[in-house]
Image: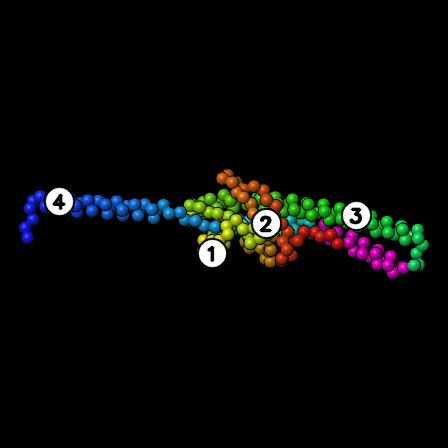
Amino acid sequence: MKLSYVSMLTIAAALGSSTVAFSQAAAATTTTAATTPKIATIAFNATVSQTNEFQRDFNEVQKKFAPKESELKTLGDEVDSLKKQLQAAGDKLSEEERTNRLKAIDTKEKQLQRNAEDAQNDFQGESGQAFQKVAEKVFNFLQDYSKQNGYTIVVDRGNAQAPIVWYSDPSNDISQAVVTAYNTKSGVPAQPGANAPNAPAPRPSATKPPAPKPATPAAPKAAAAPQKQ
């Protein structure tokens, strides 16, 4: 079958239009693929707490408060000893002597409570300062790390007790990768037997994170603050 010149032009025009449409569709697909967000999650507080730098600094805080912890233990043992002595004496004491011993025990117990509260507050304060110092560094490091690895969004996932992100594929979490990369950059070696506390989740702003105070850990108890006896 012979095609007229007009028919050939019509077919050519149609093919040209199809080619243009296909090219536009392909370009649109490429553009969409290129701009698809690459999202990751991170447990920011846990990441800071697991860095060698924070564990080193936290260990220094623990060492600083070790004498205070020993002092509190001694005072607590003294209170326990006075109570046992009073109990062992039984009815052998006069009412006046019993009253005096009870007052002495009460005075020492109040002193123990005050000292323990002061030590706890001081420990929390210095631990918080140590955490904040490293948190700011990790936050700034995370900005460069995210750019270098092509992440468009990095979301804090919180923790099991107070999750911010209720579900995310575990493969999207970059917490350990950031810890490893930060440790490499900081050059701080791993701390033998270090157990950092679980810190409350900070909410970093666009400039820098706020000043959270790490909580003393429940388990393991290696990072416990001086306790009241």
Q: Is residue 56 visible?
A: no
Q: Residue at x 67, y 51 (%)?
A: 225
Q: Which badge, 1 or 4, is on the more N-terminal residue?
A: 4
Nearest the viewer among 27 and 223 is: 27
Q: Residue at x 79, y 47 (%)?
A: 111
Residue 222 x/y as whole percent: 64, 56
Q: Residues within 10 Å of mark 2 (few under 14, many from 20)?
A: many
Q: Residue at x 89, y 50 (%)?
A: 100
Structural distance between the alpha carbons of marks 3 and 1: 49 Å
Structural distance between the alpha carbons of marks 4 and 3: 101 Å
Q: Is residue 82 one of those drawn in magenta?
A: yes
**Residue 110: mark:** 3
Residue type, label 2? Ala
Residue type, label 3? Lys
**Residue 199: mark:** 2
Q: Which badge, 1 or 2, is on the more N-terminal residue?
A: 1
Q: Is residue 130 one of those drawn in magenta?
A: no
Main secondary structure of the magenta stretch: helix
Residue occupied by mark 4:
10
The secondary structure type at the circle numbered 1 is helix
The secondary structure type at the circle numbered 4 is helix
Q: Which badge, 3 or 1, is on the more N-terminal residue?
A: 3
Structural distance between the alpha carbons of marks 1 and 4: 56 Å
The secondary structure type at the circle numbered 2 is loop
Q: Which segment did they paint magenta?
A: 66-90
Q: Are marks 3 and 1 in contact (CB under 8 Å)?
A: no
Residue occupied by mark 1:
170
Residue type, label 4? Thr
Q: Residues within 10 Å of mark 1 (few under 14, many from 20)?
A: few
**Residue 211 in the image: above or below residue 43:** above
